[in-house]
Image (spheres, grey):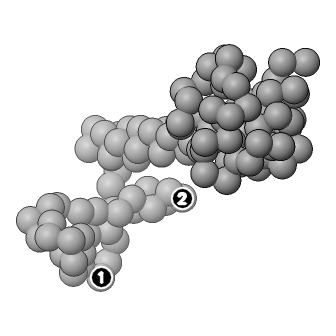
């Protein structure tokens, strides 16, 4: 945290198994009573931070696994698919293009454009 400019940010670590609290610069753990309101608060904060991180990770992974009709087109990989979707906005809009309009995209020649349109419009 110091290296990124957070010198005044208080920090602690909560060990899971024994619920010991560790503070920077203090070599020994602080052992809190199991029913202590402060320990319960720290556990809730830890659990919420974990829940948030796990939810974010699942969201990112789900975005990566979303399928597109472009995935079925030979010659169109993830990078080209993403470029086409970024350029035209949707598969429906791509379906309405001519092969020449589609071939205007970098990395798409007329033959590939015709293949894309034939697969999408099949």
Horizontal relation, residue 47 to residue 42: left or right: right
Question: Is residue 118 or residue 13 the one in the foreground?
Answer: 118
Disc 1 packing (10 Å; few <14; some 14–19; many ≥20): few
Sequence order check, earlier mark of 2 and 1: 2
Q: Is residue 114 visible?
A: yes
Horizontal relation, residue 44 to residue 96: left or right: left
Q: Is residue 47 above or below residue 98?
A: below
Q: Quadrant of the N terminus?
A: bottom left
Question: Is residue 90 or residue 17 the one in the foreground?
Answer: 90
Residue name at image x 73 percent, y 32 percent: 99
Residue name at image x 72 percent, y 20 percent: 95
Q: Quadrant of the C terminus?
A: top right
Residue 83 x %, y %: 59, 44
Residue name at image x 87 percent, y 26 percent: 118
Which quadrant of the view contains residue 12?
Answer: bottom left
Q: Which mark is residue 27?
A: 1
Residue 10 x %, y %: 17, 61
Disc 2 packing (10 Å; few <14; some 14–19; many ≥20): few
**Label 1 near label 2: C-beta < 8 Å?**
no
The residue identified by callout 2 is: 17
Horizontal relation, residue 42 to residue 119: left or right: left
């Amino acid at each position: 945290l110091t290296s990124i400019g957070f010198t005044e940010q208080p920090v602690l670590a909560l060990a899971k198994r024994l619920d010991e609290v560790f503070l920077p610069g203090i070599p020994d753990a602080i052992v809190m009573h199991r029913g202590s309101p402060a320990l319960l608060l720290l556990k809730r904060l830890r659990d919420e931070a974990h829940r948030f991180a796990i939810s974010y990770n699942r969201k990112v992974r789900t975005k990566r696994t979303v399928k597109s009709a472009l995935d079925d087109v030979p010659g169109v990989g993830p990078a080209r698919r993403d470029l086409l979707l970024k350029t035209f906005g949707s598969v429906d809009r791509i379906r309405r293009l001519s092969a020449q309009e589609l071939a205007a995209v970098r990395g798409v020649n007329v033959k590939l454009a015709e293949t894309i349109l034939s697969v999408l419009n099949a």
